[in-house]
Every structure is written in structure tokens, then in C-alpha cells.
Amino acid sequence: MSMTLPRRDVPSARSENQLDNAAKYEPPYPKGQLPIVWEKAAGTRVWDVDGNEYMDLTSGVLVTNIGHCHPRMVEAISEQIEQLDNSYSFRTPQRIDAAKSIVESTPKNLDRVFMLTTGSEATEAAMRLARLHSGKQEILAFHGAFHGKTYGAMSVAGDKATKSGYGVGVPGVISAPYPYCYRCLYDKSFPDCDFYCLKVLDRIVEAETWGNLGAVIVEPYQGAAGFIFPPDGYLKALQNWAKDRDLLLIVDEVQSSFGRTGKMYMIEWEDIKPNLLTLGKRMGSSLPASAVVGEEEIFDKGLSSTWGGGSYVFCSCTCCF
């Protein structure tokens, strides 16, 4: 027996009214986004203001790692907000516990963590730390990369759509092709190419830098570019390439961390040990939370953030569940 579900137009009446009001006071919708107004959510399901029910296949854009409004998370936030809601840079038991949990989950060379709010902030902090520690200003990034939408993060992006119209970005960024074996820029075949795209990095550095290169920033897979995964062994080879040239390796796991690839962090698949690791999105499971995890010697200068490490966030972040 087949059953036909009633069709409801989207947006419905209340959503349309709300969207009309939004158009008067907010910027336009992101391109391609469904014109609905959310009212509530639970687990994987979302309801709009007209009562229409949807399944959230995006996890709130790769954020709600334990589902929307998880009961334990709601309880933890409710209890914490009555006790303490912000501590600036002062330590709290919850923040210390979260820091310990994060550090112990990452490679042993990473022994300090700096709490922030968004993935873009984590990128910016990693860039600042790398420049400050190395004493060098240039950073090597990759074509197709997405590291956030603040100015420094946009500057290391490898896609025109992220940067177009905003003028000149932060100076000192060098770009190189990301390994994309399905559509190889060099028309090579893996593994016969023996990581040809890595071999040309020396030529790119020689031609495009001013001899002031201090760091490499890379995503272990590129999400915004179309979920492009490098061939097996590339990240390990890149790590060795950077180490041989005394370059700091920054791995951006804002999207790929907290179980998205089947391990806590994607770097675990090839035992990568970056000097700096950026985290975000799923870390707070819907609350604004991000972090930079790194080596103690790189954090020889203090950093601070007005909202980073707020008590109400780290009472319930994904890493502590």
C-alpha cells in the first residue's frame, strides 16, 4: 500500500511574512539556501514556523555533531548559565577540563591549546603565531583552500569566489596546486607520478617567495572545493617536506575533526604531527567554539580573546561529551 504525503509549498505563509521582514533589515540570503524560517530542532529534525518538518542532512553545516538540542547539552548549558556565563581570559574549571581533553586527544607534540570562537579566528590566530614564532612573514597555501572569511583567512583562500571584490588581502601568501588526482593539473597519474605536485613546490617557492617563507597551511581534505581528498601518503610527504625546510606546518581541521572521517582527527590516518592544528565547527556542536592546538614553544607570546573559552561553551563542548 502506497501513501502519498501532502505537499506543502515552501515558503509557507508565516515563513513568507518573516522573510519579508528579514529582507528589510538583514542582508540577502546565502545563494541557494532554502527560503524557510526555522523555529525549533531536535536531533536530525528541524521544524519551520509553519510546522513543516525537515531532516537536516547538513548537521547545521557540519556543526551539530551530537544533533540539535541534545538533552545533555541543554542541561549542561542551563546549569552553567546560572553559575557563570563569561570569564574573559580568566581560567575556569570547565575551561581547564576542556583544554586538558583537547590536548590529550591530539598528537603528543601538541601540548597547548588557545580557545576561540570561530574557525576563521582559529586560522587568524595560527597565522599570527606562525609569523611571530618563525620571524618570517610568508605562508604557503593551496589552490581551492577555504580557511574562513575574515581578512587573514580569506587571504590564504585558494578560490576567487571567497576573495573577489574585497581588494588586496594580507600580503605574503603564496599559492600552490592542491593534489587532485581525479583532475590532475599536471596530467599525471598516481602513484606513478611519485607526488609530482609536491616536487614542484620547491620551484614555486623559488619563483614566488622573497626568501621569507615560514609556514605552510593545508586542509587534510578540501571541503568547500568539492570534498577533494589527497592521495594516500601525500600529507605525510608534505609534513616531511616542510620539516626539511624548517617550515611550520599548520593543519586546518575546522571541518574534518571530531569524527568526520572516522577518527577523532583526520591527521590520525597518516600519523601527521603538525606544529599547529586548528579546530572549530563540530567542536562546540552548535555553540560558537574553536581552538588552535600547538607546541608550547610556539605559544611563547600571550594571546587573548573576549569571547574565546566562555564558560557557557566549554561546559558542554563536543570534546568533553
Image (spheres, grey):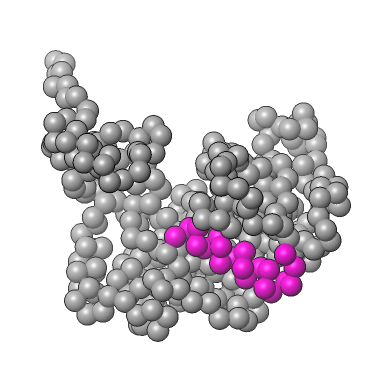
Where is 27 relative to 246, above or below?
above
Residue 193: x and y in percent read: 80, 36
- Identify the magenta region: 118-137
| Residue at the extreme top of the image, as rendered | 1
Residue 222 visible in rendering:
no
Residue 117: x and y in percent read: 42, 64
Where is 148 relative to 108, above or below?
above
Q: Is residue 119 left or right of residue 54?
A: right
Residue toward you, 24 or 153? 24
Residue toward you, 68 or 34? 34
Q: Residue at x 31, y 76 (%)?
A: 86
Residue 132 colored magenta? yes
Q: Is residue 84 left or right of residue 234?
A: left
Q: Residue at x 71, y 32 (%)?
A: 184
Residue toward you, 194 or 219? 219
Q: Is residue 176 left or right of residue 219?
A: right
Q: Give the quadrant of residue 107.
A: bottom right
Q: Main secondary structure of the magenta part?
A: helix
Quadrant where the image shows the C terminus: bottom left
